[in-house]
């Protein structure tokens, strides 16, 4: 019973501590497997997002990602179809894990925000679910459209 309770209460938000090395500035290190649990096959950077617009609003079927807010701030909202949790990231010493089949949204950014994303897989538009209704059907096991691939 105790184990079930702790699983139910486990947060959707998984934060990784990222070491910062002060050396004529700051070096921020993410190294496999110490800070990130998979070899990185793609890195991308979200630079000067439009203030007030949301990004993300999708889930990935298989791709795993770590997102780091290098400058400014971002509100991260994660949703597994049962629970919705959010937190604000505003420093490069924290990475948030975006696991497959967790819907994620990024809001409250401005032109000063700089985000780095470290992905397990190369870009594949087929790996996205961009409809929240489709996501809910998939997590409830009502579709098998991606599971058979
Ligand atoms: P998207 O992943 O929807 O961005 P965000 O999650 O920040 O809202 O991608 C936005 C656009 O960029 C979309 O047209 C696909 C393109 N894109 C690539 O071509 N390659 C990539 O690796 C990524 C992440 C996006």
Image: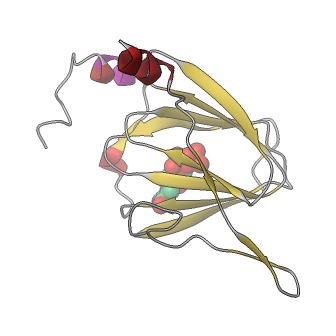
Q: Residue furthest top?
A: 1
| In this view, 36 is above or below 139 | below
Tell me where residue 54 appears, x and y as whole percent: 68, 35
Residue at the location (36% across, 61% down)?
A: 121
| In this view, 54 is above or below 113 | above
Tell me, what colour scheme is on the image? secondary structure
Tell me where residue 140 appears, x and y as whole percent: 29, 16
Q: Nearer the viewer, residue 134 or 26?
A: 26
Tell me where residue 76 appears, x and y as whole percent: 66, 36
Q: Residue furthest left?
A: 148
Q: Is residue 94 left or right of residue 105?
A: right
Residue at the location (48% across, 62% down)?
A: 36
Tell me where residue 105 appears, x and y as whole percent: 60, 34
Q: Is residue 136 magenta?
A: yes
Q: Residue furthest bottom?
A: 24
Q: Is residue 36 magenta?
A: no
Quadrant of the image containing the C terminus: top left
Total label count? 0
Residue at the location (61% across, 24% down)?
A: 85
Residue at the location (69% across, 68% down)?
A: 19
Q: Which residues are magenta?
A: 132-137
Q: Is residue 115 left or right of residue 144?
A: right
Magenta region, main secondary structure = helix
Q: Nearer the viewer, residue 51 or 67?
A: 67
Quadrant of the image containing the N terminus: top left
Residue 77 lies in what quarter of the image? top right
Q: Is residue 136 left or right of residue 92?
A: left
């Amino acid at each position: 019973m105790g184990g079930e309770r702790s699983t139910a209460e486990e947060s959707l938000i998984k934060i990784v501590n990222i070491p910062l090395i002060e050396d004529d500035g700051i070096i921020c290190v993410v190294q496999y497997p110490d800070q990130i649990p998979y070899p990185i096959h793609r890195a991308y950077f979200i630079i000067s997002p439009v203030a007030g617009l949301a990004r993300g609003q999708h889930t990935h079927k298989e791709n795993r990602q770590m997102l780091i807010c290098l400058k400014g701030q971002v509100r991260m909202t994660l949703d597994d179809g049962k629970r919705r949790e959010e937190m604000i990231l505003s420093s490069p010493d924290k990475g948030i894990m975006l696991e497959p089949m967790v819907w994620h949204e990024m809001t409250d950014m401005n032109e000063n925000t700089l985000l780095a994303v470290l992905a397990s897989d190369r870009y594949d538009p087929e790996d996205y679910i961009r409809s929240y209704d489709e996501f809910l059907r998939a997590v409830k096991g009502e579709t098998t459209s991606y599971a058979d691939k």
